[in-house]
C-alpha cells in the first residue's frame, strides 16, 4: 500500500524538521515547504493526503492558503491542520470557517499531532458516513452516503468532510438531541482533541451552505443539536 503523503508548510525550519521526523516515523511520505506562495501549485501537482499548515508565513499567509485550497475543486477535499502560535478563540474560529479540519497551537506535542493526522486520515477512509452505508431522504434534503454527497432542493451542497459527517450523524436519529460532547465522540472519535466550540463553528458553516434548508439542524438551548424530525 502506498504511503500517505503529508505536506508541512512551516517557515521555522526547526519545527518543520521536528514535525517531519515524527510523521516519517509513523510511516508517512512527508514533504516540506517554507513559504506560502508555493503551496497551491504543490498541492495541485503532488496531491497530498493532508496538509499541516502554519498560520504565519512569509508571502501568502496560512488563512489565505486555506481559503484558496478549499475554494478549488481539485484541492478542497485535502484535510488541513492549522499549526500556529496564535491561540485566541477568534483565530481558531476563522481558521475553521475557512475550512480547516483541525487547529493546533504552539508549543505542541509531536505525538498529539501525529494522532490527529492519523485520526483525520482514517476518517476520510472509513468515517461515520461510510459505516452507515445507505442513502437517506428527508423532504427536499438527500444524503447520498456512498458518494459523500448532499443535495437540497435538487442542488448539490458542497460540504467539508466534517460538516458532512456531522449532518450524517445527526440525521441517523431525527428528533434526538445530542450534546456537543456526544457529537465530538461520534464524529471525531479517537481524534477528539478539538474543543466544543469547534462543533458550533462547523454547524454554523453547515447551515449557511444549506441555505433555505438550514432549519434541518436545530439548536436545543442548554443541551446541543438535533436533526429536524420531518413529518
Image (tube, helix red, strand yellow):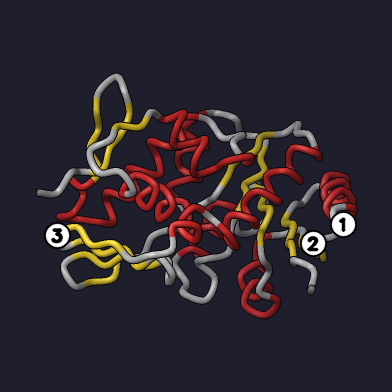
Q: Is residue 85 above or below residue 4?
A: above
Residue 54 x, y percent position in the rendering: 67, 48
- In the rendered image, residue 20, in percent from the top left (x then y), is placed at 85, 54
Instruction: Identify the residue position indicated by label 1 in the image.
Output: 24
* Residue name at image x 67 percent, y 80 percent: 45
Looking at the rendered structure, the secondary structure element under dot 2 is: strand
**Residue denoted by label 3:** 139
The mark closer to the camera, 2 or 1, is 1
Secondary element at tag 1 = helix
Q: Is residue 180 left or right of residue 101?
A: left
Indicate which disc residue 32 carries.
Answer: 2
- Secondary structure of the residue carrying tag 3 is loop
Q: Find residue 164 and report its horizontal and vertical position in percent.
A: 40, 55
The answer to which quarter of the image holds residue 85 is top right
Query: Which residue occupies the foreground of this view, 122 or 134?
Result: 134
Few, some or many residues within 10 Å of mark 1 (<14, 14–19, 20+): some
Amino acid at each position: 500500500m502506498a504511503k500517505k503523503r503529508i505536506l508541512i508548510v512551516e517557515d521555522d525550519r526547526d519545527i518543520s524538521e521536528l514535525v517531519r521526523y515524527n510523521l516519517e516515523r509513523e510511516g508517512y511520505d512527508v514533504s516540506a515547504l517554507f513559504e506560502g506562495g508555493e503551496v497551491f501549485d504543490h498541492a495541485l501537482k503532488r496531491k497530498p493526503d493532508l496538509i499541516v499548515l502554519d498560520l504565519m508565513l512569509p508571502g501568502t499567509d496560512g488563512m489565505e492558503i486555506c481559503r484558496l485550497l478549499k475554494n478549488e475543486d481539485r484541492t478542497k477535499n485535502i484535510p488541513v491542520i492549522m499549526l500556529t502560535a496564535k491561540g485566541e478563540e477568534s483565530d481558531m474560529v476563522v481558521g475553521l470557517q475557512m475550512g480547516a479540519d483541525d487547529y493546533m497551537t504552539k508549543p505542541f506535542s509531536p505525538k498529539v499531532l501525529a494522532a490527529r493526522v492519523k485520526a483525520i486520515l482514517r476518517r476520510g477512509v472509513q468515517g461515520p458516513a461510510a459505516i452507515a452505508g445507505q442513502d437517506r431522504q428527508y423532504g427536499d434534503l438527500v444524503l447520498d452516503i456512498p458518494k459523500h454527497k448532499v443535495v437540497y432542493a435538487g442542488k448539490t451542497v458542497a460540504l467539508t468532510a466534517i460538516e458532512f459527517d456531522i449532518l450524517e450523524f445527526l440525521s441517523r436519529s431525527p428528533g434526538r438531541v445530542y450534546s456537543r460532547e456526544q457529537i465530538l465522540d461520534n464524529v471525531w472519535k479517537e481524534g477528539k482533541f478539538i474543543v466544543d466550540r469547534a462543533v458550533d463553528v462547523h454547524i454554523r458553516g453547515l447551515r449557511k451552505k444549506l441555505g433555505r434548508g438550514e432549519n434541518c439542524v436545530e439548536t436545543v438551548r442548554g443541551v446541543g443539536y438535533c436533526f429536524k424530525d420531518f413529518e
